[in-house]
Image (cartoon, rainbow, N blue to C red):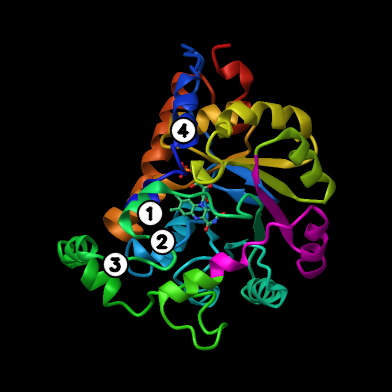
Amino acid sequence: MDYYESGSYSESTLRSNSEDLAKLKIRQRVLAGASDRDLSQSLLGEALSLPLALAPIGMTGMACRDGEIAAARAAEKAGIPYALSTLSICSIEDVAAVAQKPFWFQLYFMKDRGFTADLIARARAANCSALVLTADLQVLGQRNRDVHNGMTIPPRIGLQTIAHVLSKPAWVAGVLLGKRKSFGNVQGYIPGTEHLGSYMEWINSQFDQALSWKDVGWIRERWPGKLIIKGILDVEDAREAVSTGADAIVVSNHGGRQLDGAPSSISILPRVADAVGAETEILFDGGIRSGQDVFRALALGARACLLGRAYLYGICAAGEEGASKAIDIIKNELDVTMALAGVRRIGDIGRTSLVS
Ligand SMILES: Cc1cc2nc3c(=O)[nH]c(=O)nc-3n(C[C@H](O)[C@H](O)[C@H](O)COP(=O)(O)O)c2cc1C
């Protein structure tokens, strides 16, 4: 749970993501005739039933057995996209085998270009409808709780870890005794590597600090479909992303897990929307925990929000059903918020929906 919940270093960016969202006050409007509300939204040419998507979360399959498949199914049922992480436990093929609709694939651009090209080819073969290039993880921000718990590279398994595991028999039965316990997309790629620890070591050596905007062209040559660049937290970077031909960007600070001291995602969103909102579609994440938060982000220029920990908690609690419940709670909150704010359509939510 600490791995899922933590932010990097002092966790100041993690905290400001939700604190800054909470500061935004929504205008209450009365007698506005806000019946027959419509929560649907179009994104990248697709019709979504809600202005939401499920964010890529590494190792979701450690929260419950086949967690990525659970998330993909919950997203499908809700009529929203699911983004599968490069660092998932279930592989692209595992999810594709059960998915009824195309899902998104999130790409970490690794130093091993053969591996990266292979991932892109696998995403194409699986008919993924968008590639989400995560740009803000050229090196790992240290999460102090992980160091404390021995969730390190290589992992440190002490008596405390063993005691924790033994106190969770349902998790042992579900995950530990399950079939998939490693990084599904990497498995089999490095000969002689079998356990999670050695995969973690390899993956950690693969993040490429030399990457630049030029490298996006390399991806474009291999991926003709929709391209989303995730991890934008600066107006200049937003402009660069648009000039590479990205179809959408995600204003994000990786849920406060990377640059500690960076501003909250929501504080940057309006500036990015002013700069490039007319040229690209803007997605948003970081601290979304309620329908009111979704409303706030839409008001400041997001077309849709990615749920991160909000659905992950659902997966932890009750797998697919838990994720569906989390989405449902947020949907209902958004609907009620729209009613009380006097708004009938997602497209009518704007800056004037907030108290200035
Ligand atoms: C446990 C965890 C793992 C994550 N793994 C990935 C990942 O593999 N790829 C990625 O692009 N983002 C990853 N993220 C970031 C999320 O996609 C998203 O940006 C973030 O969770 C949004 O913040 P929130 O959870 O506070 O809403 C991860 C986030 C968490 C909490």
Residue 313 visible, this orientation: yes
Give the magenta part as a residue range: 203-232
Q: Residues within 10 Å of mark 4 (few under 14, many from 20)?
A: some
Whole-Å distance between the Cαs marked 4 and 2? 21 Å
> Which labelled disc corresponds to residue 12?
4
> Which labelled disc corresponds to residue 147?
1
Q: Mark 4 and mark 3 in contact (Cβ < 8 Å)?
A: no
- Which of the pair 77/245 is nearer the observer? 245
Q: Is residue 313 above or below residue 174?
A: above
Query: Quick one: label 3 or label 2, which is nearer the N terminus?
Result: 2
Which three-letter amino acid code belongs to the residue tagged 2?
A: Thr
Residue where numbered disc 2 is placed: 152
Q: How many marks?
A: 4
Task: Report the residue at 55% width, 65% height from top.
Answer: 204
Q: Residues within 10 Å of mark 2 (few under 14, many from 20)?
A: some
Q: Secondary structure at mark 4?
A: helix
- Which of the pair 204/169 is nearer the observer? 204
